[in-house]
Amino acid sequence: MDGTQVFQTASAATQALPGLRTRRRFWRGELRGSEYTWALAFVIPYVVVFLVFVVYPVAFGLWMGSEPKLYTELFDDPVYQMSIVNTVLYLAIAVNVKMFLALLLSGFFMRPGWWTKALLMVFVLPWAVPSMPIFTSMHWMLNGDYGFINNALWTIFHVNGPAWLDSRWLAFGSVIVCYIWKWMPFWTVIFIAGRMAIPQEIYDAAKVDGATGVRAFVHINFPILANLYLVCTLLSTIFTVGDFNTPFFISGGGPAFSTYVLATLGIRDAFDLSQPRLGVAAVMTALPLVIPLVILLMRKLKTSQVQL
Amino acid sequence: MGYVSRRSLLRASLGMAAVGTLARPHIANAAAKTATVWWTQGFIPSEDTAFRKLVSDYEKASGNTLNYSIVPFAPLRQKEVSAVTSGVVPDVMEDADFSFTPLNAWADKLVDVSDIVDTQKSKFSDIALLSRNNYNNVTKQRSFYGVPMKSAAVPFHIWKSLVEKGGAKVSDIPNKWDPFIDFFKPLQAKLREQGMRHTYSYGWEVSTIGVDPINTFNAFMIAYGGKDLVTKDGKLHAQDPQVREAVIKALTKLTTDYKDGYVPPGVVNWNDADDNNAFHSKLCVIDFDGSLSTELALIHEKEQYDDILTHGIPLGNDGKPLPAQVGIFGAVIPKGAKNVDVAKEFLKYAIEPKVLNEYLKGGLGRWAIPMPEVAKNDPFWLHSGDPHRATYIEETLFGPTMPLYEAYSPAAAQVNAEHVFQVAWADIVNNGMTPQAAADKAFKRAEAIFAKYPIQQA
């Protein structure tokens, strides 16, 4: 290396320094000296946890479900086709009925009086109790031979009740009813919180204009709660796509796999058929539905006009 | 004591973490005489006690250590599937269902255990050897991928008191298939007349969950001449008219009994334990369920224990003996196991006839020893005076037997895991299909599955 080259190299290094400094400033933000080290010490555990428990499982799942032939196999499986139909119906009916009833009930529980508060306490119990024991109890109550419901029907009316879990639509209906019963209290409480944020003055002004009861609901509550309602419905739909407990413990996917949804099918394929990759692929096919919902949800959270 | 700066503390911590991480494998390797074992929980506590004794005896004899877990069969199956998928495996696993070993042998995920089986090959029954001789799709040949340890047939279980309450005599039970099955039908009406509103003739598991529905369908199909649905060469005989007729007859018989109300309507959702529970609560007069678990659950209630009649497979309608399907459970060593030597040594010890015999006797005969000569020479199995054991052992070890179809092909394992022929009876009962159409649909699916598992003939 001659003298000229040394000069040129040194000159280039000097020119690169401001860039290096800018980059360093970018990474360090406004932190200086030891502050930066401490910040790193606090952040690194969270980054590691995020990488290990979020990034790795998601990446592993994507890798497991990445073979195209899995999807050919999946689409050939008649149980998969039925599970898709059931999942769509489950989301469309169970989520919407639940949310709408929760919205109405939240109005009821806004009524003054100690007894509504006491009733609310009882009403939230299904949500507060863990899913497994409560759904197992429901499963036994629905047993056609010796379940509580049919025994009660026989004792009171001398009527033989239907075999609730032995035909597709009755079993699927039972799953939906149990799902609504379990989760409606939670969303009712959310809507009560939403309603409580509406200023009383608006109601008073509306009352002067003659808007009470249904008219107050249509012209005041619903417009103000609309954004909250939409966000909650989107959230609930995303949660429900992955709902394994309700269909599994109520109907067990039966009779003859006719009430399987994608979440239960994934477990069946992975463990009953000993094909974990197929199970992951089954759940992956929900992504085209879940991703747009997540994007929509993010947009709603970003651009909401009415804040509650 | 020197000053500890923040920087030096961080540096030292990182250094210690790195040293710990790197040193760990060497520490583990130093204890090479330890093996991890996953075992299925027994149906009765004495099965687990017997397994613990087996482990402790081995540890004393060998100086090795076994870290064992006893897990109920359903979670164990999930644990095992997860283990072979992730590669983080124990050294020994008891296979928790009949499909695990054939499917994983096919995928080359199990260690060849021929050297273990060879130590007792002359003592094992043919069915035991056939059942654990599975096809490997990488080596393109069959070999032993599981060590046989337990055998089980499926007997009928009958409440003697309900037969008599229904106005019949136990001694009058016919011994040909259809007359045998039909004998119990009229009992239902007579029991109901006496106020047993929820008692049914049969507890057949006409569902699509677990192993019992598969056993039930297979027994009826074999009784009607369909034994060769899958043959030893691993081929499916969907086009064989005799097999097809047997499948249709089995579907017709079972679904007619169901539709006519001789089977509890809830059976369509029953899992393996549900028919046991239903039988115990006298919801049905007769049940068809694998092993002696139904009886042994009542062993401490002598009156009820003695009230059950254990009945083997009756003769065929032509008067000829029918083969009973016998399932073989045992242990496998997954590929990736760290201590294969210890695993192999333990399993060689566990299948020594005396050791295996003592272990299985601890389970009170729920599982028959897959070594007929040992059973013949120990009065426990055939001459103990127990009202059920001798019948069951005769059926499992000394009557005409055949292996489960899973032994012949991993495709059969998938067909059964998907409950292809059990979906057929759901199609008939719930969707109004004819037995012929339901059978055609099932055969089509079975053929598609078999096409994925081609087996090269030796």
Image (cartoon, rainbow, N blue to C red):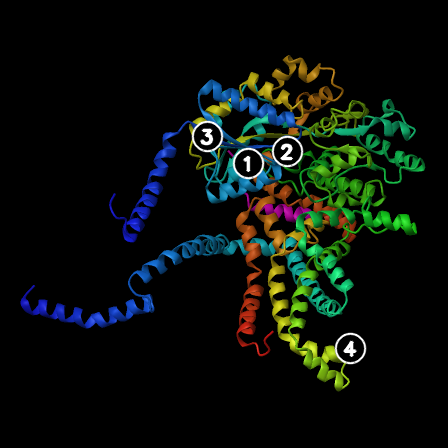
Quickly name the residue at label 1.
B101
C-alpha gap between disc 2 and disc 4: 69 Å
Q: How many marks?
A: 4
Left or right: B235, with B195 as reference point: left
Label 3 resides on the chain identified as B
Which residue lies most toward the bottom here? A209
Quickly name the residue at label 2.
B404
- Numbered tag placed on residue B35 in the rendering: 3
Assess disc 1: are there few (<14), some (14-19) or many (≥20) residues with their C-alpha within 10 Å of its C-alpha.
many
Which residue lies most toward the left here? A3
* B153 vs A230, nearest the viewer: A230
Whether discs 4 and 3 lie on one chain: the answer is no
- Considering the numbered disc 3 on the image, is that residue within a helix, a strand or a loop? strand
Q: Quadrant of residue A211?
A: bottom right
Q: Amino acid at mark 1?
A: Thr
Residue B143 appears in view: no
Quickly name the residue at label 4.
A213
Contact, CB < 8 Å: mark 1 with mark 4? no
Residue B142, given in percent of the width and then of the height, sits at 51, 33
Q: Quadrant of the N terminus of chain B?
A: top left
Residue located at (61% from left, 48% from top): A268
Q: Amino acid at mark 2?
A: Leu
Q: Which residues are magenta?
A: B442-458
C-alpha gap between disc 1 and disc 4: 66 Å
Q: Amino acid at mark 3?
A: Ala
